[in-house]
Every structure is written in structure tokens, then in C-alpha cells.
Amino acid sequence: MTHSEPTVSPKLERPKTGFNDYAERLNGRAAMIGFVAVVLIEFLTGKGVLSWLGLIH
């Protein structure tokens, strides 16, 4: 009796939650958009984001 390797490998579905490539890519893109938005707000208003939001004076 010989031991042979399987001929078909299972197709495993990638996880949709947790730390996966898609989540990390989406998080990075959201961070870049947020950073650009903060820089634009400061440039256009002449105030920092916290003062623009009314949190500091």
C-alpha cells in the first residue's frame, strides 16, 4: 500500500473579517484620504482642525 498525494487542492475562501489584505488596504486608503482632508481644511481655513471643529479657541 503506497501513500500518494491528493490530486485536487481545496479552494479555501479568504476570511472577510480580521487582519487581511483587503481590510489593510482599505484602512490605508481611508487614512490617506483623511490626512489630505485635514491638510486641505487647515490650508483653506487658516486654522487647525481642532479649532475649526470648535474644540479649542
Image (cartoon, rainbow, N blue to C red):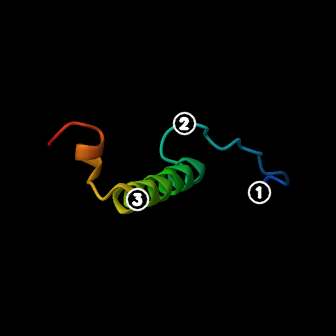
> Mark 3 or mark 1, which has the lower sequence index?
1
> Mark 2 or mark 1, which has the lower sequence index?
1
Residue drawn 27% across the image and 54% down it: 47
- Relative to 39, does residue 56 appear above or below in the rendering? above
Return the x and y of residue 31 as percentages of the image width and height. 44, 54
Residue nearest the observer in this picture, 7 or 50: 50
Q: CA distance from mark 2 to mark 1?
A: 32 Å
- Callout 3 touching callout 1 (CB < 8 Å): no
Q: Which residue is mark 2?
A: 17
Q: Amino acid at mark 3?
A: Leu
> Mark 2 or mark 3, which has the lower sequence index?
2
Q: Viewed as shown, does residue 21 lie left or right of 55?
A: right
Q: Viewed as shown, does residue 2 lie left or right of 31?
A: right
Return the x and y of residue 4 as percentages of the image width and height. 78, 56
Q: Amino acid at mark 1?
A: Glu
Q: Which residue is mark 1?
A: 5
Report helix, strand or loop for mark 1. Answer: loop
Q: Which residue is mark 3?
A: 44
The crowd level at tag 1 (other Cα within 10 Å; few <14, some 14-19, many 20+) is few
Residue drawn 20% across the image and 37% down it: 55
User: Marks 2 and 1: which is nearer the front?
Assistant: 2
Residue nearest the observer in this picture, 54 or 28: 54
Return the x and y of residue 52 as percentages of the image width and height. 29, 44
